[in-house]
Amino acid sequence: MSPESSPYTGRSWGNANAVRRVETPGLPPYYVFPHLEPHVFCGFTTRAGGVSVAPFDTLNLGTTTRDEAACVEENRRRMSAAFGHALGASIRLEHGCRVVRVDAGESVADKPCADAVITCARHLPVAIYYADCVPVILVDPRRRALALVHAGWRGTMVEVSVRAVEAMQEAFGTDPADLLGGIGSSIGPCCFEVGPDVKDVVCARFPQWQESLVSVDKDLHTRVDLWNLNLLQLEHAGVPRRNIAISRLCTACRDDLFFSYRRDRGQTGRLAMLAVLP
Ligand SMILES: [Zn+2]
């Protein structure tokens, strides 16, 4: 199936079919994936509604930046109130493909470094923090389990999303055909410009898909589509394409809405995607 046949066509400025913006008076806004709402709470944040000052303005949720700790704490309090769920610790990211499982009463903070977390625990919020990397939520409505994946370009190269599907199969008996997925705000095919080294790695690892992943413009700038690459990997792993929504919100394009590590040259805040099984 060609990527053009995706029902989620759109631009980096957002796909109204894939996401819905949630606004609560006095609290920070966030986005949800409507097709997931019956099965899981999953929201991802913007930079709006917080107290941090530049370059972390305003809703920086990351505890590993140079931002004032008191500001981050207040931002996290506000975002937890908006979500109705506490923003917990992050898995300690390593830009690889390790998957960890958390169960009731556990914290991801106590787990080894990883880039995906799976759980079947109800009422246990799990979160990942990012600023360009691709956040992926996968939900198994039948087995009542989820995966939250942090797929930067390195993680995408080693197919961390697929490793999460495999971990759900092993841990919960998940059938990939049952999985529903969502790809949140992240650096889009409009902005993820790469050098020849990265382009060569992509083409060598995924030769069958390179035409729909790599674009070269008239000035010979090369860009890679990490959204489509994660979609193709998941489809190849057995997740139906129609089950996966891509927000098409580019963190680098939308400086009004999002932090972007690349655009802001590393001095920026962190966004969050949070998921909780009901
Ligand atoms: Zn962009």
Image (cartoon, grey):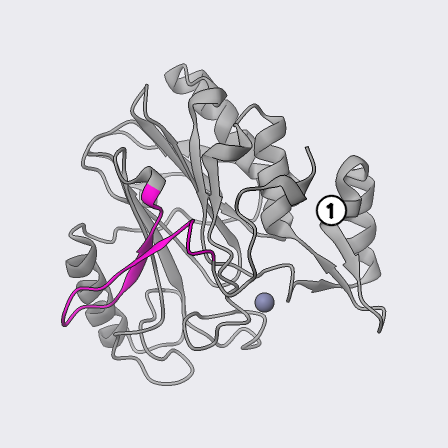
Q: What residue occupies the far bottom of the structure in this picture? A: 54
Which SS class for mark 1?
Answer: helix
- 5, above or below 59, in the image: above
Mark 1 residue crowding within 10 angstroms, few (<14) / some (14–19) / many (20+): some
The residue located at (77%, 39%) in the rendering is 205
The residue located at (32%, 32%) in the rendering is 102
**Could you tell me the amino acid type at mark 1?**
Ser
**Residue nearest the viewer, comparing 183 with 8:** 8
The residue located at (45%, 70%) in the rendering is 259
**Residue 202 image offset from top left, x and y in percent:** 76, 47
**Residue nearest the viewer, comparing 242 with 84:** 242
Quadrant of picture, ligand 1 = bottom right
Quarter occupied by the N terminus: top right
The residue located at (36%, 50%) in the rendering is 90
Q: How many marks?
A: 1
To which residue does mark 1 refer? 212
Quarter of the figure with residue 196: bottom right
**Residue 86 image offset from top left, x and y in percent:** 19, 52
Quarter occupied by the C terminus: top left
**Residue 118 image offset from top left, x and y in percent:** 38, 32
Q: Which residues are magenta?
A: 15-34
- Does the beta carbon of the residue at mark 1 sit less than 8 Å from ligand 1? no
Q: Is residue 68 magenta?
A: no
For the stretch drawn in magenta, the main secondary structure is loop
**Residue 100 image offset from top left, x and y in percent:** 42, 33
Q: Is residue 27 magenta?
A: yes
- 169, above or below 150, in the image: above
Q: Is residue 234 left or right of residue 172?
A: right
